[in-house]
Amino acid sequence: MNDVAINAALVVGASGGIGSAVVDQLIKSQRYTHVVSVSHKSFVDSGSSEFDKFSNLMALETDYSAESINTLMANLSSFKGCISRIVICNGILHDDQKDIFPEKKLEDISESKMMHVLRVNALLPLLFLKELVALVKGEKSCVISVLSARVGSIEDNRLGGWYSYRASKAALNMLVKTAAVEYERRAKNVRLLLFHPGTVDTNLSKPFQSKSSTKLMQPSEVAMSLIKLMDRSDTGSNIEFIDWEGKKINW
């Protein structure tokens, strides 16, 4: 499969609101010979006719364990050097089943719940970056985008609260920025992007939409904005932390 005609895209966390919208936009662009979706549950059952019509959509499932991620990446070895776009969408803010909700005060902090949020939001993307470096290294220009959040900015933190989510996104930013230093040495063809999508109409933001003072974005809007930003070639850096409008966010 290592052929100049192959141009693949990969979306991790593809069953979520933003992830599925990104897959949809990648397919509609008709720029990619293969679009690979990775999710915890079956993705092609989403009912989108666009997915049904795209014969080169590869829908892969994972339990997001380190072993599963390693196996998944090994199964994609035939795409080595042929992937030009990757979007990592994993994220958690609340979970009713696990009784996880953004903390309002110090007394709300639970060690086990915080560790779960840190694993999903910070460690999982890093595990993918660990496995991807060998897969994307090559001549083809590749952009890897990881969904972050403005609340992960240490300098921008003026309201407090949301300890686990803030800490996990700040950790994610540091981990991706550190990985960018290594990618610069080992895979110079790769640019990394930390992306704040704003308040998006998905299950993640639903309990907080009425209290948000910012515009409520649709997943399709955010997906189009992200793809457009990934297509830029004049950034002058191999790592950025920006919002959906392309504006830089303080680390």
Image (cartoon, rainbow, N blue to C red):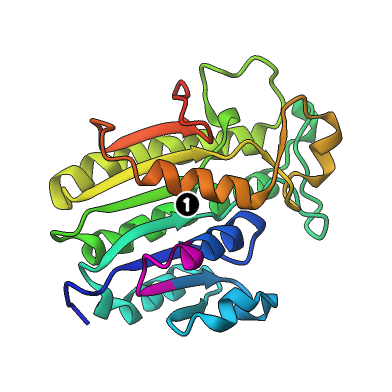
Among the 4 quarters of the image, the one containing residue 158: top right
Report the residue marked by disc 1.
123
Q: Residue at x 28, y 42 (%)?
A: 180
Image position of 104 with respect to 221: above or below: above
Q: Position of residue 184 (x, y in %)?
A: 18, 43
Q: Where is residue 107 in the image (x, y as percent from the top left)?
A: 79, 30
Q: In this view, does 117 lie to the left or right of 94?
A: left
The amino acid at mark 1 is: Leu
Range of magenta residues: 26-35
Q: In which quarter of the image is the N terminus?
A: bottom left
Q: Where is residue 25 in the image (x, y as percent from the top left)?
A: 52, 60
Image position of 95 with respect to 238: above or below: below
Among the 4 quarters of the image, the one containing residue 14: bottom right
Q: Is residue 105 left or right of residue 71?
A: right
Q: In which quarter of the image is the C terminus?
A: top left
Q: Which is nearer the eye, 53 or 157?
A: 53
Q: How many marks?
A: 1
Among the 4 quarters of the image, the one containing residue 131: bottom left
Q: Which residue is drawn at 48% across and 68% down?
A: 27
Q: In this view, does 236 lie to the left or right of 36?
A: left
Instruction: Find out whether residue 28 is within the magenta segment.
Output: yes
Element type at marker 1?
helix
